[in-house]
């Protein structure tokens, strides 16, 4: 407790409590205080035996951090733990990470590669879940910027609602919802959400939106995986099945160090469905489940007919 209070005092807004009961914390670390070029989010789970007999469970989250960079940094942190057995080490870890980021900033003139990848890769996702919607290949954020750049009006920020968090094997999921009628409102809501330190530090912020264009009788819709492969497409597919419109749903996931496999997609969609029900975009959880089952059955029947 003393260590956590000290870290909160030292790092201020960069220190974030993800789940007090489960003792899950994260801190955003940069190579400098003003406009850092190299940043990393350290998420830690403190087990009951920490610091006397158990090390922290940790996750290093940075779009550019993978391969050799990840291995070297992880080895450095584990070496610090071994050298300081039984002692509090979080401050030492944070400063070691900062030291690595400063070295990268000083030795490299290039920007970090910010392409994000998922922590979990399924060898076989199966063909049982067929998406009607295929996500576009371009960067959705760039597309959103392009769409909204033509609108000069500063539209009002919609009300943002937050769902009940769901935790499974130390991964936490939480949905956020906002009514939207233009792409510019989508962009404003996302920017507002990312101002929240806790949401910004999530391993993934998956989102999808559907806007009905009455003049053209069509839907303007898009989605974003944010590194969780296929999650955005699955979320949008759920919204299509439920036939919701003029709404943006974002699901934040804080990875807890244990791979969930396909269950992560179930949790993402359940969080999304629950918040859509809570704010009356869907009448009930039972009703929201029926179209999905029916749709799935139709797809399987079609598949059988095709095979024969």
Image (spheres, rainbow, N blue to C red):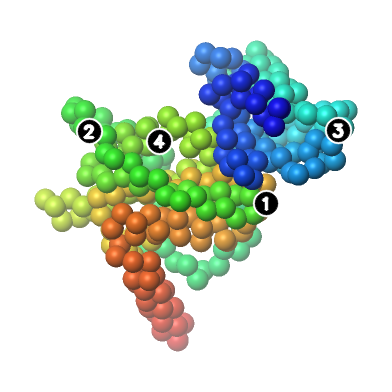
Q: Position of residue 216 (x, y in %)?
A: 14, 52
For label 2, the residue is 156
33 or 118: which is nearer to us?
Answer: 33
201 or 121: which is nearer to us?
Answer: 201
Q: Quadrant of the N terminus?
A: top right
Q: Are marks 1 and 4 in contact (CB under 8 Å)?
A: no
How crowded is the residue under tag 3: few (<14 C-alpha within 10 Å), some, or many (20+)? some
Q: Are marks 4 and 2 in contact (CB under 8 Å)?
A: no
Looking at marks 2 and 1 on the same chain, the residue that comes earlier in the sequence is marked by 2
Looking at marks 4 and 2 on the same chain, the residue that comes earlier in the sequence is marked by 2
Q: Could one spot residue 145 in this view of the protein?
A: yes
Q: Is residue 171 left or right of residue 49?
A: left
For label 1, the residue is 258
Q: Could one spot residue 79 in this view of the protein?
A: no
Secondary structure under tag 2 reads loop
Secondary structure under tag 3 reads loop
* Mark drawn on residue 86: 3
For label 4, the residue is 193
134 or 25: which is nearer to us?
Answer: 25
The residues bearing labels 4 and 2 have C-alpha atoms spaced at a distance of 15 Å
Looking at marks 3 and 4 on the same chain, the residue that comes earlier in the sequence is marked by 3
Question: Relative to 199, is 210 above or below?
Answer: below
How crowded is the residue under tag 1: few (<14 C-alpha within 10 Å), some, or many (20+)? few
């Amino acid at each position: 407790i003393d260590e956590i209070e000290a870290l909160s005092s030292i790092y201020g807004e960069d220190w974030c409590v993800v789940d007090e009961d489960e003792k899950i914390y994260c801190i955003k670390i940069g190579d400098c205080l003003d406009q850092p070029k190299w940043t990393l989010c350290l998420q830690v789970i403190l087990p009951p035996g920490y610091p006397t007999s158990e090390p922290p469970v940790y996750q290093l989250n940075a779009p550019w951090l993978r391969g050799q960079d990840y291995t070297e940094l992880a080895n450095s942190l584990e070496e610090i733990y071994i050298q300081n057995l039984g002692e509090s080490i979080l401050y030492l870890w944070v400063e070691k990470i900062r030291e690595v980021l400063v070295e990268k900033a000083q030795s490299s003139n290039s920007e970090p590669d910010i392409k994000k990848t998922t922590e979990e890769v399924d060898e076989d996702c199966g063909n049982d879940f067929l998406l009607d919607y295929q996500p576009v290949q371009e960067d959705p954020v760039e597309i959103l910027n392009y769409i909204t750049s033509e609108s000069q009006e500063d539209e009002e920020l919609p009300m943002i609602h937050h769902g009940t968090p769901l935790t499974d094997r130390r991964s936490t999921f939480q949905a956020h919802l906002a009514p939207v009628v233009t792409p510019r409102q989508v962009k404003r809501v996302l920017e507002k959400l990312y101002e929240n330190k806790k949401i910004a530090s999530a391993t993934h912020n998956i989102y999808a939106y559907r806007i009905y264009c009455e003049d053209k009788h069509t839907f303007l819709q898009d989605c974003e995986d944010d590194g969780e492969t296929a999650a955005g497409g699955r979320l949008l597919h759920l919204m299509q099945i439920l036939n919701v419109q003029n709404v943006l749903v974002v699901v934040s996931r804080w990875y807890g160090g244990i791979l969930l496999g396909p269950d992560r997609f179930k949790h993402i969609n359940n969080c999304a469905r629950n918040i859509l029900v809570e704010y009356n975009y869907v009448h009930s959880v039972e009703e929201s489940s029926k179209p999905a089952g029916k749709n799935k059955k139709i797809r399987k029947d079609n598949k059988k007919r095709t095979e024969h």
